[in-house]
Image (cartoon, helix red, strand yellow):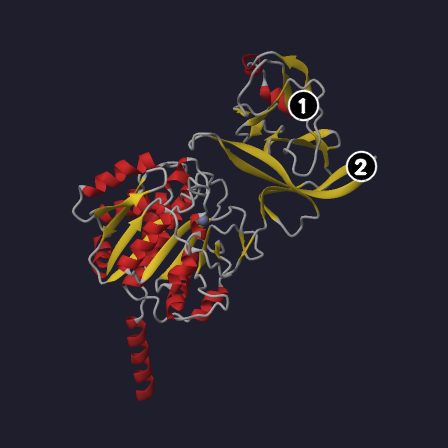
Amino acid sequence: MKKTILLLFLTCLLTSLYAQNFSSQMFYENHHNYKEKSITVKRVVHKEIIPLINNLKLSSIFTVKSLGYSLEGRSINMITIGEGETHVLLWSQMHGDESTATMALFDIFNFFSADDNLNSIREKLLNKLTMHFIPMLNPDGTEVFKRRNALFIDLNRDAERLQFPETKILKAVRDSLNPKFGFNLHDQSTRYTTGRSFKSAAISFLAPAYNYDKTINEVRSNTMKVIVNLYDELSKIIPGHIGRYSDDFEPRAFGDNMVKWGTSSVLIESGGWKDDIEKQFIRKLNFVAILTALQSIANNYYEPVNITRYEEIPENERLLFNVLFKNLTIKYNDKPYIIDVGVNVNEKNLKESSGYYFEGKVEDVGDLSVFYGYEEFDCTGMEIEPGMVYPEEFNSLVEIQKFDMDKLLSDGYTFLKLFKENIDEKYFNLPINIVVNQPDFEPKFKLDGNANFIIKKNDDIRFVIVNGFIYNPSTNTNNIKNGLILK
Ligand SMILES: [Zn+2]
């Protein structure tokens, strides 16, 4: 009896010592209170964040330091909060087209400036940690929403040579602060799944290796432990949507080198979520993940974690298409074959970073039964044919705009012909493609071609695919964002 009581007492003691009172659910539920309202889309640029950073200078809890300038002369700043013993360094968007965490960092600044019922949580973080944030390390790449810097350099492959102002800044900050933890904040492909499941990898983590043998020293194992905490906490919110990034050693990358230099660095990769083109839901998950990780570090919740659990997190696989049409019949010389068709819709940048349009592509064809789609259609008994060109010709876009698009689409037309001297645009905000000055244009269904086709059942048109988007004639509904102008 005495033994049982003693055991019970010891268990209680251990549980209370290591009780992990994470506030992840609270961060998730209250994110809207802290969401930086001036940032609403992922193509956020340097000139939009500078006033926000300047505002932080007015608050006593933030210290803003200018770290230097990018190749094209845009300022790179560090925001510091907290007075704790443990230093943490977080940097976002070293790849210019990976902005999700940048958006979340401004939400986190709002969280720390707020005065509400989460005060005890933020006070604990501020007392235990000194947090240094560098939002948008690659402002030149961001300006054109491209991965690389102004000299086309992938900054995450410059950790050894350290030639560029952006990478020199990051290394100098790391060396001056010698932070215990680092957070390397990126975006990954939205087409990753968690393992072989159909679920998108909304967030993936990595504890980078620091050598080819992938040795686990204390610096790396601390990263793994924090990641296990993150995995457990986020699994309560988005079960099955958390992945693990490949830990192949990359000697030129920052995450890997940070571990070598003594900073436990957590890679957070923001992935995809159905219909979240602007990544606003993933931004919220970032907010939760980063604050949860900071709680893990501030309260030492990570310490008792068994690192073998890190291996439980499913590895990223690339198994998702935007749309997967399954079991279609296609005819070749009148003979039928069964195929699946995987369609992806990609964003194409215009010159200014804010502008872009969509281009739908036939990504793969054949037996795609090992893949999934954000949207899937079983097209058993249905036939695929190329889209059709409307016979009448037009002389201006204004004429086209007057046309009844529902009628055109439900009859299976995916192209209109336009005869005009000059047209610069690459797309048009109509749910149809426009073929310019090509009298003999003939639509074809082909691999890597634009995704324009119709799906029929017994001569009845079931779906019309325009530029990768779907029109459903039975409901007259479409989600077609834009058609292409083909010159
Ligand atoms: Zn990246």
Secondary element type, mark 2: strand
The numbered dot on residue 127 is none
**Left or right of 404, for residue 251:** left
Please, which residue is most extreme toward the bottom here? 2
Image vertical order of residue 395 relative to residue 484, above or below:
above
Image location (x, y in percent) of residue 449: 65, 35
Question: Is residue 25 in view from this perspective?
Answer: no
Looking at numbered disc 2 in the image, what kind of residue is underneath it?
A: Tyr
Looking at numbered disc 1 in the image, what kind of residue is underneath it?
A: Asp
Q: Identify the residue shown where x is 67% and y is 23%.
A: 411
Image vertical order of residue 252 relative to residue 372, above or below:
below
Q: Earlier in the sequence, mark 1 or mark 2?
A: 2
Image location (x, y in percent) of residue 322: 57, 41
Image location (x, y in percent) of residue 5: 30, 83
| Residue occupied by mark 2 | 332
| Residue occupied by mark 1 | 411
Image location (x, y in percent) of residue 88: 29, 58
Circle 2 crowding by C-alpha within 10 Å: few under 14, some 14–19, many from 20 = few
Q: Identify the residue shown where x is 25% and y is 59%.
A: 129
**Left or right of 391, for residue 272:** left
**Which quadrant of the structure image shows residue 362?**
top right
Question: Is residue 303 in view from this perspective?
Answer: yes
Image vertical order of residue 162 relative to residue 339, above or below:
below
Q: Identify the residue shown where x is 68% and y is 39%.
A: 447
